[in-house]
Amino acid sequence: MPKMKTDKGAAKRIKVTGSGRLRRDQAFRGHNFETKSSVRTRRLGRAAEVAKADEKAVRRMLGI
């Protein structure tokens, strides 16, 4: 059986915390900042947790 390959696209986007939780960057922070409030822009800058429904698939992509 071949070795399992890590999905490199997922690995670059998702980090695993020390306690094993999955953290991701939020969307909608690439451009068009004139239309978004400063509060919204700062909020989107913080990392978010991966949704519970997606966690199994993401862990498989990361090989953990």
Image (spheres, rainbow, N blue to C red):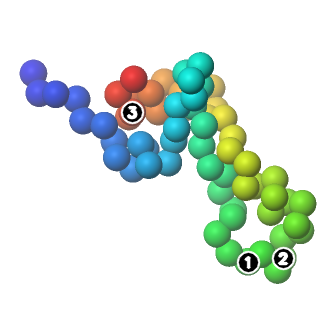
Label 2 sits on residue = 35
Mark positioned earlier in the residue sequence (1 or 3): 1
Q: In this view, does 34 lie above or below 6?
A: below
x, y percent for residue 16: 52, 31
Q: Specify the quadrant that holds the C terminus.
A: top left
Residue 62 image label: 3
In the image, what residue occupies the spot 35% across and 28% down? Answer: 63
Q: Distance between the residues labelled 2 and 3?
A: 35 Å
How many other residues sit within 10 Å of disc 3, few (<14), some (14-19) or many (≥20)? Answer: some
Q: Which amino acid does label 1 sit on?
A: Asn
In the image, what residue occupies the spot 60% across and 43% down? Answer: 24
Q: Please, which residue is most extreme toward the front here? A: 18
Q: Which amino acid does label 2 sit on?
A: Thr
Q: Is residue 41 above or below residue 59?
A: below
Mark positioned earlier in the residue sequence (2 or 3): 2
Q: Kindly check if marks 2 and 3 are in contact, taking CB atoms under 8 A apart as contact.
A: no
